[in-house]
Image (spheres, rainbow, N blue to C red):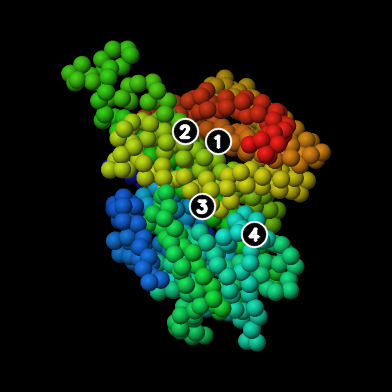
Amino acid sequence: MTTYKAPLRDYRFVLTELFDVGELAKLPGYEDATPDLFATVLEEGAKLCEGVLFPLNRSGDEEGCTFENGVVRTPQGFKHAYDMFREGGWTALGCDPEYGGQGLPRTLHFLMEEMICSSNLSFGFYPGLSYGAYNAIHEHGDAEQKRRFLPKLVDGTWAGTMCLTEPQCGTDLGQIRTKAEAQPDGSYRISGTKIFISAGEHDLTENIIHLVLAKIPGGPPGTRGISLFIVPKVLVKQDGALGPRNGVRCGSIEHKMGIKASSTCVLNFDGAEGYLVGEAHKGMRAMFTMMNGARLGVGLQGLALGETAYQTARAYATDRLQGRSVKGAQNPDKPADPIIVHPDIRRMLLTMRAWTEGARALAAWVAIELDKAAKHPDPALREEADDLVSLMTPIVKAMFTDNGFAATNLGMQVMGGHGYIREWGMEQLVRDCRIALIYEGTNGIQALDLVGRKLPMHMGRLLRRFFHPVDAYIRERMNRSELAEFVLPLAKAFSRLQQVSALLAQKGMADPEEAAAGATDYLRFFGLVALAYLWARMAELSLGKIEGPESAFYKGKLATARFFMARLLPETSALAAQIGAGASTLMALEAAAF
């Protein structure tokens, strides 16, 4: 009984009012990507997501994937839905036309990915992992590998995975034991076990192209000795035809808290034939192409499930009759008022809405910069765009998933007992969303990446890509009285962010534990300021349009912006105090005393 309609009006607001997505059509290769094309593609995508994928979400969760005699079967209806998805060209949306892709911007792919995950997160894993494998081969593979593997990945006939984790290591990939032994013909024999492999085995495609991290014997220790290999489930002949089955088998599938229609596999590689991608011992650089894209994609999952939770909770709060308003009966002709009259219900709904719509604005900003980094003819502007994407990637991954999980839990609270009952659907959203805080690098790892790598990178250059536009915005609008309720809270929080950034940098240079101790709080602080900046901009836009034909839409934006500034942004004060408390409050207790 969950509810989902693609938020097409909000997409249009973000793409054509908050930002100018039409600028992307000026970039080489994106000439056809006009706002009209964006609107048409998103409307068609909405039909697929609402009409085909969303109805399978609950049944897929109930049935789950099955594993028998080495074969994984997806839930009923998934194969048909995937065939429709592939035949509609959705797997090719953001891919290179040279290999059969449509060559459309990543921004459009981002929004489509949000809709897919909102309607059916488990389904989204299958094309999502394939797109990641496509990107890694497209960027790091040689001409022969691209010719051999990309066209079928692009048209969706084949799927892809990324195989990193092993039983003894997750984040610490330097400990991997999977080995790759060179063969006289230039191929390698891959042996080892990988766990937690999303979409590692399934019945949706005729082949699966695994991208596998392994070590070549005799290489450097740790991560410096990791290489990346293409390992097909079914071997591919030179002419592209399928050959015999390769030496990779699914050993089992995981029985999980959520995303049950996504097959999460143990894969055993037993002398499987593989092909080196890029240079030997340089696999981490290539794998990070997949991982960074995946981290942005996981962030979108948090946003997506937050949207579905909000729509479902809003519908329930409008219909559910319980009690009377504290001001007196609002519907005296009925036995009770709808619960949306109660202030605490509104607090929860507005929190969900503020997180979700703010995250969508930030996601669009990052996506547009990602397209600029890939296509802009000016190298300096490409560098600026890439810097901002790099800085924001850990924030998008961690904050969007933290807030998405919070939103699903708030949705459950709004629905009370019905939220806890399986038939109503909200508990599935809670279960599905929980993994997003863990995989592709836990949110704590994202915080360490932000503080330990991104802030000091290039002498703080990445930080300036965000600080400078925010500072300019505040300075230009500080004296505009009509914007004071938005700009002044932003200015105060931004000033504190600058102060805690300097504090962490200073303390971290003397003692790395100090920076690590404040990392999670700092990431959230940074994310709150980023959302405040965008909410201020959205409020400014809406102020000039509240008397127009879409008055209700813009008044909703203004009310949500006011709520964010007054009710959510003040969290930065507590976070500043927590960061200032330092490492001693965390590290003083001896490990044995826990």
On the picture, is 416 further left or further right than 234?
Answer: left
Q: Residue at x 33, y 14 (%)?
A: 326
- Name which residue type carries label 4: Leu
Disc 1 residue type? Answer: Leu
What is the CA distance from the residue labelled 2 to the residue labelled 4? Answer: 37 Å
* Spatial separation of the CA atoms under disc 4 and disc 3: 21 Å
Circle 1 packing at 10 Å, graded few (<14), some (14-19), many (20+), is many
The percent coordinates of residue 212 (x first, y second) are 57, 68
> Between tags 4 and 3, which lies in front?
4
Using the image as rendered, state which of residue 194 and residue 157 is in the foreground: 194
From this viewpoint, is residue 214 visible? yes
- The residue at which mark 3 appears reads as 297
Residue at mark 1: 531
Residue appearing at x 47%, y 45% in the figure:
434
For disc 4, the neighbor class at 10 Å (few under 14, some 14 to 19, many from 20) is some
Residue located beneath label 2 in the image: 354
Q: Is residue 239 above or below residue 23?
A: below
**Quadrant assignment for the C terminus:** top right
Please, what secondary structure does the residue beneath circle 3 have?
helix
Disc 3 crowd rating (10 Å Cα; few below 14, some 14-19, many 20+) is: many
Marks 1 and 4: in contact by CB < 8 Å? no
Residue drawn at the location 32% of the way across and 60% of the way down: 75
| Residue at the outermost left position | 333
Q: Earlier in the sequence, mark 4 or mark 3?
A: 4
Chain-order first, disc 3 or disc 1 = 3
Q: Indicate the secondary structure of the residue bearing disc 4.
A: helix
Coordinates of residue 588 in the picture (x, y in percent): 72, 33
What residue is disc 4 on?
Answer: 173
Looking at the image, is mark 4 or mark 1 nearer the viewer?
4
Among numbered discs 3 and 2, the one appearing first in the sequence: 3
Which circle marks residue 384 in the picture? Answer: none
